[in-house]
Image (cartoon, rainbow, N blue to C red):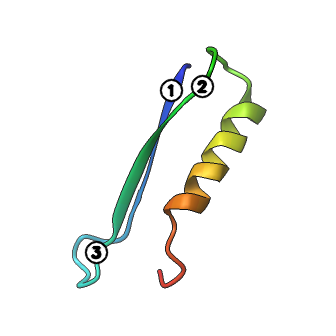
Amino acid sequence: MKSIHVFLHTSPHEPNYYSRSTVLQTPYPTDDTRVIVRLVRTAIAGLCKRSY
């Protein structure tokens, strides 16, 4: 895999619906779970809002 699409959202039926996403590019193709998890955790930290 050379890119990862990370997204999150709250219930679209709630009044304060929140949705964010990002696409991460890797410098080289990888199937190493450790690399993938590290990238996704970094992305999630940037996408999350504390109030949700």
Vertical arrangement, residue 44 with respect to residue 36, above or below: below
- Determine which of the numbered discs, if any, sits on residue 38 in the image: none
Q: Nearer the viewer, residue 5 or 24?
A: 24
Q: Nearer the viewer, mark 2 or mark 3?
A: 2
**Residue furthest toward the front?**
27
Residue that numbered label 1 is attached to = 3
Location of the N terminus by quadrant is top right
At a point 67% along the width and 20% down the height, the residue shown is: 31
2 or 3: tag closer to the N-terminus: 3
At a point 28% along the width and 75% down the height, the residue shown is: 17
Is disc 2 in contact with disc 1, using a CB cutoff of under 8 Å? yes
Vertical arrangement, residue 25 with respect to residue 27, above or below: below
Circle 1: element type: strand
Residue type, numbered disc 2: Thr
Residue that numbered label 2 is attached to = 26
Going by the image, does 41 lie left or right of 6?
A: right
Circle 2: element type: loop
Residue that numbered label 3 is attached to = 17
Q: Nearer the viewer, residue 20 or 11?
A: 20
Residue type, numbered disc 1: Ser
At a point 26% along the width and 81% down the height, the residue shown is: 14
Q: Residues within 10 Å of mark 3 (few under 14, many from 20)?
A: few
Q: How crowded is mark 2: few (under 14 residues within 10 Å), some or many (20 or more)?
A: some
Is disc 1 in contact with disc 3, using a CB cutoff of under 8 Å? no
Circle 3: element type: loop
